[in-house]
Amino acid sequence: MIKINRLNWKIGGEAGYGILSAGEIFAYACLHGGLETFAYLEYPSLIRGGHNTYQVWVREDNVQSHSSHIDLLVALNKETIEKHLHELVPDGGLIYDENDNTLREYACATRQKNCFAVPMADLAKQAGGQKVIRNMVAVGSSFGLINYPYNYLFDLIARFFEKKGSKIIELNQLAAKAGYDYVNHKYSSQFEYKLKVRRINNPKILINGNEAIALGAIKAGMKFYAAYPMTPATSILHYLVAQERNYNLVVKQTEDEIAAINMIVGASFAGVRSMTATSGGGFSLMTEALGLSGMTECGTVVVIAQRPGPATGLPTWTEQGDLRFALHAGQGDFPRVVLAPGDPEECYELTFLAHNIADKYQLPVIILTDKYLAEARQTVPLFNQDSLRIDRGELADTNRLAVDARFVRYAVTMSGVSSRSLPGQAGGIFTANSDEHDDTGLANEEAKVRTIQLEKRMKKIQSLRAYIKEPIKLYGLEGADITLVGWGSTKGPILEAIKALTGEGKQVNFLQVRCFEPFPVKEVDSVLRQAKQRILIENNYSGQLGGLIREKTGIDIAEKILKYDGRPINPEEIINYVNG
């Protein structure tokens, strides 16, 4: 039975084999043909070598995660077959390089059905290239097998290698065409999975979470970005560097994470919207300056792209283990906001919101993401910008300031938010330091002053609750038989699982928590009190969201799906648990 426009494709090989290039060209070629895609890559934390994979799930409907089931596996080395052959569905296909004797013998011994031998090295050589361009032969072979029009691949190769010149473009196009023709003529009728181009009216983009965060920051008016490279946050730095001149940004790679956060606190003090991003290890170094942001009431935005810890942990893998860390980092009590987007659209939206909150409420805002969300690419509509308005908060009016008096920067107000002046503003002089202070910023250790100022700062949490419009989202029917509870990058796998479970006749909904501080107690309590069966889903060992829910609402979610091996939860794990 022919299966149209539903394909899960995966390519694997050593680092240096061009796995990333092959995967992205495959994904974008499908996008340009009107298909929905979700692309996910895995690679080890090695400078050279190691096993790399790139997986692309292609469908006509919105696809929101990867899957543990593969329909077409492309093996450029033996390790790909050893590690991933078990993922192939029964009628799935295996493409391998028959020029590799070891690989050919192993492939034939392990799989008899739908095993497609392609002389990739020979075809690469015939095209005029070296063995390294087998990756383009592999992509061409894949599209030839599924009868996808070659012109989409031809165009994508031209775009992808544009900066490398016409000779490199032509070489890769010839290699892809050689693979396409060889497989299309020899094997196409033997494989049941096919992709067909769709014409769609509404344009879409293929984007990952880090790129969406960068775009959300630019839209919000961010003009200064400082960061030290740390996987998986580094690509935000790379993306913004490339956009410096287009949007008049200043992007600084600092000597370490301590310098990065101190720079953005200083930029915020000067009235410039700023941001930094790191992972858990880098954020460990930032915690003292996070407190400085809280004490001086300089609004800052910090992105934590999580990876497994502690210490160096698993640098290129994923986890959700830093929720509690983000909530409690820094000594003493000071207000902060912690947000957790679940897909690229929310990365864009919540990063824009984070900058507004940081300015309006003059406090640090933390955005929690992780390697899976940061680097996986998903097809989404063009971001909706209609309702986005920049809100800079309480800025002092020079016409109402007394030039001969100190500015009352930390005046006590009902909301806890005081008017702020900018450096050089006439009548706006005040002191800003890390000590407790009076309302003009002068250091003061009196008990009454300490009490007044601490309570003033903490008032912000109550006043900003109404500003965060959707701290939670509920997907599916209210009163469903099963309520799945999760946050961040578990959103996609959960929604995919719900599609499948609903198709089986089950009633399942999903409570997504998008804001952890201030915690939406009433909203979460209302949903969970009505739930008949609750299942917590998190990529960490201790069920950190579950513990926070129990702390804030008294509700204990007994059933849990917890995964902490560095790999993201997949929809099949959720489906299998629900089905018992």
Image (cartoon, grey):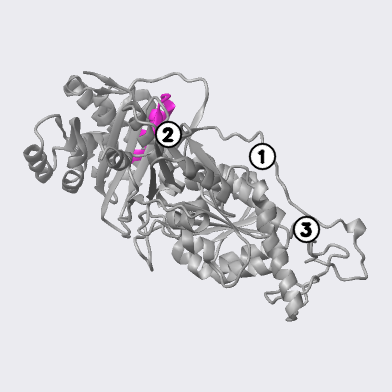
As measured in the structure, the alpha-carbon distance from the residue carrying label 3 to the one carrying label 2 is 41 Å
Q: Position of residue 424 (x, y in %)?
A: 82, 64
The amino acid beneath tag 1 is Leu
As measured in the structure, the alpha-carbon distance from the residue carrying label 2 to the one carrying label 1 is 33 Å
Residue at image coords 50%, 38%: 474
Q: Are marks 3 and 2 in contact (CB under 8 Å)?
A: no
Q: Say what secondary structure mark 3 lies in.
A: loop
- Which one is in front in this view, the residue at disc 3 or the one at disc 1? 3
Circle 3 Cα neighbour tier, 10 Å, few/some/many (<14 / 14–19 / ≥20) = few
Circle 2 Cα neighbour tier, 10 Å, few/some/many (<14 / 14–19 / ≥20) = some
Residues shaded magenta: 22-37
Residue at image coords 39%, 56%: 543
Q: Are marks 2 and 1 in contact (CB under 8 Å)?
A: no
* Front-lying residue, 473 or 364: 473
Residue at image coords 19%, 31%: 93
As measured in the structure, the alpha-carbon distance from the residue carrying label 3 to the one carrying label 1 is 27 Å
Question: Mark 3 highlights which residue?
Answer: 414
Location of the C terminus by quadrant is: top left
Question: Mark 1 highlights which residue?
Answer: 388
Question: Mark 2 highlights which residue?
Answer: 480
The amino acid beneath tag 3 is Met
Which image quadrant is residue 365 in? bottom right
Q: Position of residue 2 (x, y in %)?
A: 24, 18
Residue 157 in sight here: no
Location of the N terminus by quadrant is: top left
The amino acid beneath tag 2 is Ala
Q: Say what secondary structure mark 2 lies in.
A: loop
Is residue 538 found inside the magenta-colored segment of the image?
A: no
Residue at image coords 38%, 68%: 311
Q: Main secondary structure of the magenta part?
A: helix
> Is 30 left, or right, of 92 in this rendering?
right
